[in-house]
Amino acid sequence: MFKFKSHNPTALNIALLLKDPRIEFAFQKLELLSDEIMKEHIRICEIPAPTFSEAERAKYFYNSFSNLGLLDSKIDSAGNVSAYWPRVSNEYICLSAHLDTVFPINTDCRVKKQGDRYFAPGISDNAAGLVGLLAIAKILVEVNLIPKIPFLFVATVGEEGIGDLKGAKYLFKESEYKDCIKYFISFDGPGIERITYRALGSKRYRITFKGSGGHSWGDFGIVNPIHAIGRAISKMANYKVPQQPATSYNVGIIEGGSSINTIAEEAQMQVDLRSISALELSKLENHLLSSVKEALREENLASKYSDSLLETQVEVIGERPSGEISSSSQLLQTAITATSAFGVNPYLDCSSTDANIPISLGLEAITLGAGGTCSGCHTLSEWYEETDRIKSLKRTLLLLLALSGLN
């Protein structure tokens, strides 16, 4: 069943673990828990948790961590939920998943099953990761697997959108565990092949144009904030981003105006800039700011009958650092070997996740899928299938124990 591409120390260590009767028993127990895991998955998904409003789901995890037998379950001042196993330590291996979703609080998150697919907003991102977090904790405690390096379990807040990795930033910069995490592994969404070891940098802006406003007929010709936004977007759309290093931009939200026959007093847009390269991200950022400046100048010049000029307000509303861990790092090589042990060819990836923060601080961190397949993430038609979920959870359990050692 298990195949290895090499006989390096990491592979041999994993091979020994796979022969350990305790690991075999844990794997068998995971298989028996499949239905229970899916029921828990549905319960988690149906608790609304928009970014900045994760409190109800956080309380659920606080209770779940305690009920599973993890130690010192708590909610920190950022809103993260944490607990450890099997003892307090000055060094941990951290397994994490983010609590928040991209959907408003009044979104219908009830799960509906059609064939083998489960449909609901957030069912994959990140209810799949969160239930994986609980499943791993449950197996460790029930089978009484005692790692040499204790495990820290964390459900973070503010991973999505303008949450700006709030929970991860607090965990690594302010929390009581900030200097105690040796390896960080984040569960984010489904899948088993993907291993994210490169942090995709991003910068997010809110750009506001302000003017005097007026009537669309009687005041025609005065400065128009919405027209200025159109000018700025047009200039952004003409920017030629490189394919390598991969770079992107997106105007995700436009707001302003009160009626079709009113010249708005104010309009704003929110812009997402991303690149694998810090240099390309800086170039893109400079282009955005120059586009806004030029759009302001053009709108003010074009509106020659206006008694007032437009003003702009530029706010940074999100900044995610880039970086990557070494391809020879212990964490990455162990993750590759553990994945390959199940006959899966790992895919090394770059993305924006909670792992951005520890990677930017020079720590070893990766993000994994928690198994299953999906489509429609971040949409109301999101769905999830359980394909390879148990295999992925076995892989992660094996990875954790290979990193920590087993008493």
Image (cartoon, helix red, strand yellow):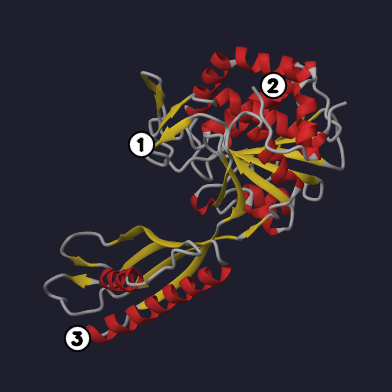
Instruction: Report, in whole angstroms, how far the alpha carbon at label 3 lies from the one at label 1.
Output: 46 Å
* Residue matched to label 3: 305
Residue farthest toward the top in the current orientation of the protein: 32
In this view, the residue in front, 200 or 162, is 200
Q: Nearer the viewer, residue 311 or 277?
A: 277
Estimate the x, y position of residue 288 in percent, counting from the top left. 42, 73
Residue 54, compared with residue 16, is above or below; it is: below
Q: Is residue 197 above or below residue 303?
A: above
- What's the distance in space between the residues labelled 3 and 2, CA to CA? 70 Å
Query: In this figure, which residue is indicated by the disc labeled 2?
Result: 138
Proximity of marks 3 and 1: CB atoms separated by less than 8 Å: no
Q: Which mark is residue 380?
A: 1
Q: Amino acid at mark 3?
A: Tyr
SS under mark 1: loop
Measured as percent of width and height from the top left, residue 309 is found at 31, 83
Q: Is residue 123 above or below residue 162?
A: above
Q: Is 42 positioned to the left or the right of 91 in the image?
A: left
